[in-house]
Amino acid sequence: MPASAFPSFRGPARGSFARFSRSSSVARIALVALAVGGMGCGGSEPEVDSSSQRKLEQGEVVGHTTEAGRVQAWRGLPYAAPPVGPLRWRAPEPAPAWEGVRTATQSGSRCVQLGGEPVQGSEDCLYLDVFAPAVAGDAVPRGDERWPVLFWIHGGGNSMGWGDQVPPSALVRDHEVVVVTINYRLGIFGWLSHPALRASARGPLDASGNFGTLDMIQALRWVRENIAEFGGDPGNVTIFGESAGGVNVYSLLISPAATGLFHAAISQSGMPATVTRAQAENWTDEGGGNDAAGSGGAVDAVGALQPGLPGSSGELLLALLRQEGRASSRAEAKQTIAGMTEAEIEAFLRGLSPEALLQPFVDVMGDEVMPMYMSPAVVRDGVVIPEGRPLDVLAGLGGHERVPFIAGTNRDEHKLFFLMSSPHVERLFGLPTGLKNARLYDLEGEYGGAMWRAMGADEPVSALAARSGPSVFAYRFDWDEEPRVLGVDLAKLLGAAHALDLLFVFGQTELGFANRFVYDDPESAERLSHAMRSYWANFAYTHDPDRGRNDDLPDWEPWSNEPEAPKYLILDSDRDGGIEVGTDRIDASLVLARAERDPRLASDEERCRVFRNFVQWSEALTPEGYAAIASGACRAHPLGTRTPFPSLSHEFDPEG
């Protein structure tokens, strides 16, 4: 088969395997655009709108108006007690009541994360914002007239981000929905599973290690108790999230603790991803040994020792002991742990400031501190998150929340991340200016996007459709019409990259100065954004995207597992194919098999580089599988030790 005829993942559903749209990705441009879009949430304090006064379970509150008086907003509402002091690494508790009328015109503090000097945010961060159509207090709809609720979970690798990052006002303004955005504990504050913390737990929720997940569940309880006061329907709540927020949507689908708190769900660029206790706790070498007695650490389902992931609580503890002068080497830190009681380990961890707890990740990064760091999240504790692979749980090997569901990914997901790390990109002073090898950049981006789609949409949606029937939907976001700026072809660098769908779902197509870096044709982009907002809103109302709120869009049919039947909707602008139906289905094994025989990859080195990306970015291929693939040819091209995001492992330890 000639290379030109080899099936591409980019366009089989449009009648041709040879559809190669403008390639690629520009990470910083997307992030700048999102930051500009989010600026409307900050700045000077808005003027209080007396008509927005509402009475909640905790007390009375007053907000402000936006969107020329068409949307009311209440910001910085506490949904849980501050998780500080003894409540660090505990399940969230209900927020205390307040006296008088609380002014809610500024969002609450961001949760602790890197990105300041070098840390920003506060542990006192469990706040949410509510946006609703503007009505006086005595005109808030009741009963069947109440508006559906969209509950937003932000992304950021579960280690960065905040709820008010992207303004949701356009959804509220155009479609009469209530939108709730939340902060939740991040990184090692949101997910830290360790035997010493379990030993003092007040119950199974405290012992779960899933504090960030429990924050989301507590926020959903707050919505159930209070959202009717804003005109929202507590019996019609749709959770939706992007990237790590989409991962968290999947975690809530399978969490018994979230049952009954939401009624539909949307995952944008997420995937069902959880870790075992052993992965979350053990050292990356020697298969464990992070407990006080040094007896071997957490074990897997069959009782075997399992190495931990980089950034595990065991690796963190080793790094912190050395940082605080309690040990001078990795080996000595292990000996120190063996001589400590669980109470001593817990007291040591709880006694450190947020800055000290995050310093080991800063040290790994060196001169370039990134906001995102990697530590294990969403732990299979057997209470909050079921044991077993999440895809198996979704397929029916355990309980899950059966609700109408949409999942989708962006065609060029990985190019956002490849942009700053790929050797195929030309750079000047660290900034991308073009491509050294457009062929390989496109191919690696194509396979990265295909694997993300397989694991984030096609595989879980197919499993859910087999169990739940015609209430499961999928999409692929294909928009790739960025402009050329100062000679740099942003469409060639960015394409339909990770996170760009946020601009369309939230109606951020008028970014002022930033428009010139994002949209080649803002009017065309706005038409696609209008369509996506209409689909999302109709799903919130009816649990079926159908033809949108105005019944004027192409029909979005449910996923069908029948061959050649409709599977997903391709979301693209009207100048580049428009909205169309896709009928193909892929899975991880198909993507791996296609990469192994793709004639467009001209050498073992090129082929193995694609496979290395799979090992670094997903669970689709293990290091052992990498060594065996391509008839063992990849053994000549070692994986190396660096991962895309900073983490903690002995491999980065100069004394390792």
Image: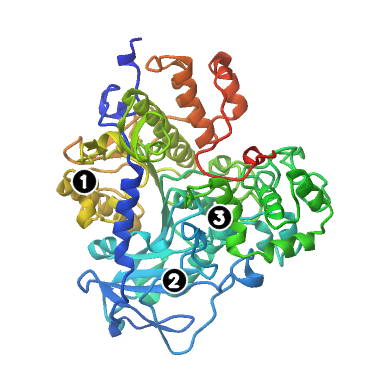
Left or right? Give the position of 169 relative to 373: left
Q: Quadrant of residue 633?
A: top right
Left or right? Give the position of 233 relative to 33: right
**Which numbered disc flags the more N-terminal residue, 2 or 3?**
2
Q: Nearer the viewer, residue 40 or 142?
A: 40
Which quarter of the rendering shows the N terminus?
Answer: top left
Q: Secondary structure at mark 1?
A: loop
Q: Secondary structure at mark 2?
A: loop
Q: x and y percent of residue 212 in the render? A: 55, 59
The amino acid beneath tag 2 is Gly
Left or right? Give the position of 366 relative to 325: left
Q: CA distance from mark 2 to mark 1?
A: 31 Å
Q: CA distance from mark 2 to mark 3?
A: 18 Å
Please say if the residues under marks 1 and 3 sit with CB atoms less than 8 Å apart. no
Number of other residues with Cα within 10 Å of mark 3, as a class: few under 14, some 14 to 19, many 20 or more: many
Q: Is residue 254 visible?
A: yes
Left or right? Give the position of 105 relative to 16: right
The amino acid beneath tag 3 is Gly
**Residue that lies at the very extreme toward the bottom in this rendered image:** 100
Write down the residue under mark 2.
Answer: 108
Q: Nearer the viewer, residue 304 or 43?
A: 43
Q: CA distance from mark 1 to mark 3?
A: 33 Å
State whether residue 247 is above or below residue 540.
above
Which quarter of the rendering shows the C terminus?
Answer: top right
Please say if the residues under marks 2 and 3 sit with CB atoms less than 8 Å apart. no
Number of other residues with Cα within 10 Å of mark 1, as a class: few under 14, some 14 to 19, many 20 or more: many
Q: x and y percent of residue 329 in the render? A: 74, 46
